Amino acid sequence: MKKASSLSELGFANDVHHALFRPIQEAAPPSPTKRHTKISVVGAGNVGMAIAQTILTQHLADELALVDAKPDMLRGEMLDLQHAAAFLPHTKILASTDYSVTAGSDICIITAGARQLPGETRLSLLQRNLALFKQIVPPVAKHSPGALLVVVSNPVDVLTYIAWKLSGFPPNRVIGSGTNLDSSRFKFLLAEHLEVNAQDVQAYMVGEHGDSSVALWSSISVGGVPILSQLTKDKAAMEQGVLERIRKAVVESAYEVIRLKGYTSWAIGYSVASLARSLLRDQHRIHPVSLLAKGFYGIPEDHEVFLSLPAQLGRSGVLSVANIQLSEEEAARLRRSADTLWELQRQLEI
């Protein structure tokens, strides 16, 4: 059988990857691969258990470890999952209040976090979460020094920064779930508006997770067709208004779910499982995740902030960041978020 020609042999430029993506600073190589995969989830609340359940049903790990401070509830969750063994791919399920149960993990997912109290300032909430992360991150890093850390707890961007500082890991191995779910909500609402399948929509929300996230309008495409460039000037102006309403709906959708059922769980479960799959299986897929953003899109090199950018994920964590062309307004909003987070982080004792 004739060997298929590589793109370079057909005349495609060898350096095209470097034109599309920017490398990560101070990146460490992937840890040695092994057949047995282990994922640990710290925090067995609604979000943590939705992530664990999705990981099990998608058979992403041979071993799943759960950690929580509430022993009875934790054991109950473990037993409930173990009792489904006959209906699931074989996965060993462990649970303990002791972080030694996480030893040898490929990925450690942190969902534990303090909730904001009525009238509490953002800084006060962060101080309480910092104290909590000081109890979580060092033992996790000690027992799994080669792991990838995935932070889901909110406020996710600052807590990912805290996890990076406390772990001592290289920045490419510490990732926040960021706007991966925001982008899924964005694609769903765009698909509804355009009457297409959400899997055929390419669209990203970036920046700080939450109300100030940035929708990248110019990057929206369906089946490879750029949306805004296909419209007349008058029609594009009208669509911009529709798109802004969609962006606001994305931001408000989480609040709507919380208002109706009290919490969000299933969508974040699928979102984090998709990140775990891309990381563990070295898929080089692009996800908008919270990463060390200094030096990207004009963010100052001395601002060690984590913000969501479309990033290539693989076995060593963040491999590169996509060179998406941002408008001046989009880039300015990113930098404003970076400035706000940096000033907040400087007040933390870390």
Image (spheres, rainbow, N blue to C red):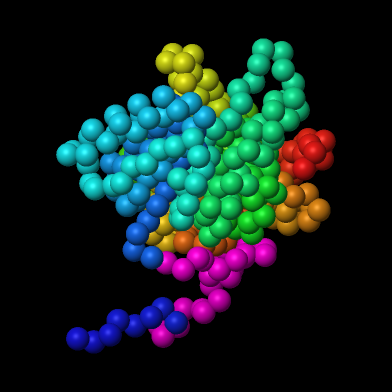
Q: Is residue 119 visible?
A: yes
Region of the chain picked out in magenta, as a range: 9-33
* Magenta region includes residue 314: no
Q: Relative to residue 134, is residue 10 drawn left or right?
A: left
Q: Relative to residue 280, is residue 16 drawn left or right?
A: right
Q: Residue at x 37, y 41 (%)?
A: 94
* Magenta region includes residue 29: yes
Residue 145 in percent (x, y) is at 56, 58
Question: In the picture shown, does residue 286 fall above or below 98?
Answer: below
Q: Residue at x 67, y 63 (%)?
A: 25
Residue 33 in percent (x, y) is at 42, 67
Question: What secondary structure characterizes most of the magenta part?
Answer: loop
Residue sticking out furthest to the left: 86
Q: Residue 296 sits in which quadrant?
A: bottom right
Q: Residue at x 58, y 51 (%)?
A: 141
Residue 217 in percent (x, y) is at 56, 42
Q: Residue at x 53, y 72 (%)?
A: 16
Q: Residue 236 sits in which quadrant?
A: top right
The residue lying toward the viewer, choosing from 50 and 105, is 105
Residue 270 in percent (x, y) is at 39, 38
The residue lying toward the viewer, choosing from 337 and 265, is 265
Question: In the picture shown, does residue 301 fall above or below 250?
Answer: below
Q: Relative to residue 32, is residue 217 drawn left or right?
A: right
Q: Quadrant of the N terminus?
A: bottom left
Q: Is residue 312 visible?
A: no
